[in-house]
Amino acid sequence: MCGIFGITGHAEASNLTYLGLHALQHRGQESAGIVASDGHGLRAHRQMGLVADIFDAPVLAGLPGQSAIGHVRYSTAGGSQLKNAQPLFVAYAGGQVAVAHNGNLVNAGALKEKLEADGAIFQSDADTEVIMHLLARSKQVSFEQKLVEALRKVEGAYSLLVLTQNKLVAVRDPLGIRPLVLGRMKEGAYVVASETTALDLIEADVVRELEPGELLVIENGVLRTSRPFAEPPRLGRCIFEQVYFARPDSVLFGNSVYEVRKQMGMQLAREQPAPDADLVIAVPDSGVAAAIGFSQQSGIPYDVGLIRSHYVGRTFIEPQQSIRHFGVKLKLSAVRHVLKGKRVVVVDDSIVRGTTSRKIVKMIKAAGALEVHLRISSPPTKWPCFYGIDTPSRQELIAATHSTDEIAKYVTADTLGYISLEGLGTAVGDPSRGSFCTACFSGEYLIGELSPSMPEANKLTA
């Protein structure tokens, strides 16, 4: 779920990368980094924390050059530590190279074991470092050939930005699991980012989305594109990007995220109506568009019943048990005036463990709601993701071991309804779901050892 941003051909590359990362902060809040090239060498700055806290004017002034790549991190493979912050940056026999990676490699462990047996020394726990070792060991002649050979050995999700002293390379995995979009500024600089929202902030025009399996090289203002990987039998774009990850003002996989989420809410209202309710509210912010769609389809008025605090950062204190239960209230508070005496439909994007939903429902009832009807704009999350989402193991996913009625009882909702997998496909404009990965809902893993034919993928293991 990380965010990546790159630019080449602009005198203020690192400053614009800072802005781009700021627009992608929702994709990762643990660490951030920028690597810039002035044509002679690369300079890097990486740190734990938020973009605005890490980069100030002196730091950015120390990252000169006309090309830069940046990364905001949400850890999946590798813990939340500075050594795993990206972009990763090394010098090897072929020169200096930096890599920013959004996604997760499912065979990184096996590759790392083999590389270590051959004498490789790893400095991080991030799966991205495997790519750098494979790149450095390649016997191919050109840099692009080395990169392609390395990527042909990995399996999983990767949208990558690779920076050398004189070129910027962007590449998506053949399934197209994670997004990547190309833009261009009026001055002529090219930009590549995880989402269009980053292009909007710096007033760059969207050129197009990179194709799954495409490798794009930008050098001296010239673009070269190729499709060097074997074409898979189908695409596997992450459907949860549309449900939750992407910002609603982005255009993702060719569609407005906001409009898709509204369609999810409308479809949810058709499938799981709550005809006697007085009010529809959202769990902000990710549930807002779906709640508006639910309201429009059902005719039940929409209002703001929960307020989200935008000033909740990471806490570095361990709260005493006596105050720990205030956790959700740090992020959300109920509007008693709106909720008191009402039968309320609450729309959220997903339920994972169920603990947060339970606290939210209880908060709404404590504010005076007569009934709470919980509606979820995605199907039950029954399976962990191995492609870039830090989901719990399967036994921790409440929908893997409990029925909808049992979950409703646990979260203390009067009723609970999920959109169907078929309905979700309709909402995203792909009723057959033939171009999306839905493994977290269906258990149908698309890559290698995680395919549904492998029994290990389908076990509830300890």
Image (cartoon, rainbow, N blue to C red):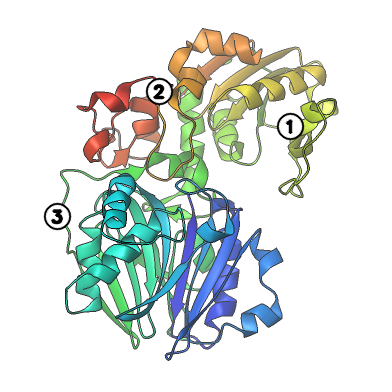
Q: Secondary structure at mark 3?
A: loop
Q: Secondary structure at mark 1?
A: helix
Q: Residues within 10 Å of mark 3 (few under 14, many from 20)?
A: few
Residue nearer the viewer, 451 or 341: 451
Q: Residue at x 59, y 78 (%)?
A: 15
Q: Residue 420, labelled with which disc?
A: 2
Q: Secondary structure at mark 2?
A: loop
Please state which of the two labelled residues, at mark 2 or mark 1, is closer to the viewer: 1
Q: Residue at x 60, y 53 (%)?
A: 30
Q: Residue 150, labelled with which disc?
A: none
Q: Is residue 39 left or right of residue 448?
A: right
Please state which of the two labelled residues, at mark 2 or mark 3, is closer to the viewer: 3
Q: Residue 230, labelled with which disc?
A: 3
Q: Which residue is mark 1?
A: 328
Against 145, residue 31 (above or below) is above
Against 274, residue 162 (above or below) is below
Asked whether the residues under the numbered discs 2 and 3 touch, taking CB atoms below 8 Å apart as contact, a structural biologist would say no
Q: CA distance from mark 3 to mark 1?
A: 46 Å
Q: Residues within 10 Å of mark 1 (few under 14, many from 20)?
A: some
Against 347, residue 389 (above or below) is below
For the question of whether residue 305 can be seen, the reply is no
Mark 2 residue type: Ser
Of the image marks 2 and 1, the number of the one nearer the N terminus: 1
Asked whether the residues under the numbered discs 2 and 1 touch, taking CB atoms below 8 Å apart as contact, a structural biologist would say no
